Image (cartoon, grey):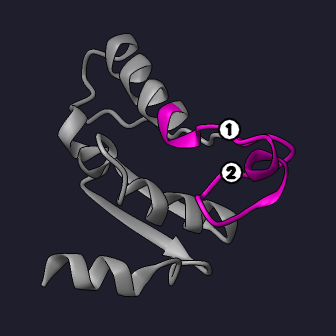
Amino acid sequence: SNFVLVLPEGKEFSFNAGDCCGAAKHDDINDVEYLTHLKQELTQEFSFLHPSLTYGIGWNNGAFMLTYAMQQAPAPGMFKAIVPIAGYTHRLQEMVNADA
């Protein structure tokens, strides 16, 4: 069975997660688009990758980024599941209310 681990790095160790953080937020970088493009490129490069079996794990600002990305179109289908560690409560109530 094949496996690919990708460790993206945001601008100056930050991702633009909507309401935060760092240089990526300050410079209004579209990190959702970045992750979408990265997934497309990897799927093309590695023929064994199945787009619907992509998982995300993030720590701190990376966790905010994953949670934020899951709320954005066309990103909701970007990951089958995410594991946000610290920072995972980013706008969580809005997500809960959207599912109600």
Q: Which residue is mark 2?
A: 15
Query: What residue do we see at 43% from left, 55% from top?
Result: 56
Query: From mark 1 to mark 2, how far is it between C-alphas?
Result: 8 Å
Asked if the residue at tag 2 contacts the one at tag 1, i.e. Cβ–Cβ closer than 8 Å, the answer is yes
Query: What residue do we see at 36% from left, 58% from top?
Result: 70
Q: Main secondary structure of the magenta part?
A: loop
Quick one: label 1, few (<14), some, or many (20+) residues within 10 Å?
some
Query: Where is residue 4, by image quadrant?
Result: top left
Query: Where is residue 50, by image quadrant?
Result: top left
Amino acid at circle 1? Ile
Q: What is the secondary structure assignment of the residue under circle 1?
A: loop
Q: What range is drawn magenta here?
A: 9-33
Which numbered mark, 1 or 2, is in the foreground of this view?
1
**Residue 67 in the figure: left or right of residue 52:** right
Disc on the earlier residue, 1 or 2: 2
Image coordinates of residue 78 in percent, x first then y, are 31, 44
Residue 85, magenta (yes or no): no
Q: Which residue is mark 1?
A: 29
